[in-house]
Amino acid sequence: MKKILLTVCTSLFVFLFASANNADLFTYDVEAVDQELAQLQSLEDYVCVNPGVTLTDMQSENNGLLAGMNLNMNTGGFSFLSGEPPLGIPSFLWGCVLSWVGILVVYLVTDNDREETKKALMGCLVNAAAIIIWEVIWIVALGNGLWLY
């Protein structure tokens, strides 16, 4: 039985490796990227020619260079500053997956945000409850298996 299972797993691994070998994940069309960024390049050229011009000034003047552009003013990597979960991962998952370490990370990254820390604590408690339930089921399934501990 072990040989059959090993053969099936090996065959599956070889098949998946062979089919993923021809994946073209890291190629892109340079022309398409340049075409998409052409409008942004013209905006950059305008700002270089006219020093001191700000995006707010251009928006108030309804400058034609901004037509059709979606310039998001989000801070990007600093998502914890805009009320989003730390590093884009929900605080509940931080606590559930990493336990007390996840609570600490959420507490430090969100600059002592009580709500986010509470969500991480709830995730940690759910993780602890799941582990306790699993252990109880395991002990009952083994039938007085306390000798394992």
Image: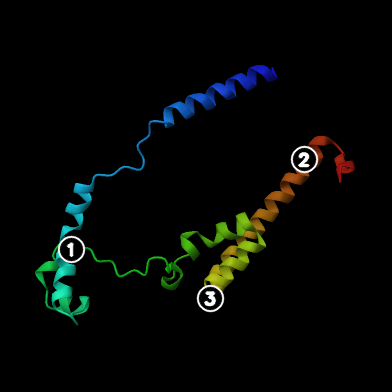
Q: Which amino acid does label 1 sit on?
A: Gln
State the residue in front, 133 or 34.
34
Quarter assignment of residue 59: bottom left
Seen from this angle, which residue lies furthest right? Answer: 147
Q: What element carries label 3?
A: loop
Residue, x 53% and y 76% (percent of image)?
111
Q: Which amino acid does label 3 sit on?
A: Asp
In front of the other: label 3 or label 2?
A: 3
Tag 1 and tag 3, C-beta contact below 8 Å: no
Q: Work out whether mark 1 precedes mark 2 in sequence or the reverse, and give the earlier one.
A: 1
Q: Residue 138 carries which label?
A: 2
In the rendered image, residue 115, in percent from the top left (x then y), is placed at 54, 71
Residue topped by disc 1? 41
In the rendered image, residue 73, in percent from the top left (x then y), is placed at 30, 70
Q: What element carries label 2?
A: helix
In the rendered image, residue 76, in percent from the top left (x then y), is placed at 38, 66
Q: How far apart are marks 1 and 2 (CA)?
A: 63 Å
Residue topped by disc 3? 111
User: Quarter holding the N terminus?
Assistant: top right
Specify whether 32 is left or right of 148: left
**Dot 1, how many residues are within 10 Å of its Cα: few (below 14), some (14-19), or many (20+)?**
few
Specify whether 141 is left or right of 108: right
Q: Work out whether mark 1 precedes mark 3 in sequence or the reverse, and give the earlier one.
A: 1
State the residue in front, 98 or 43.
43
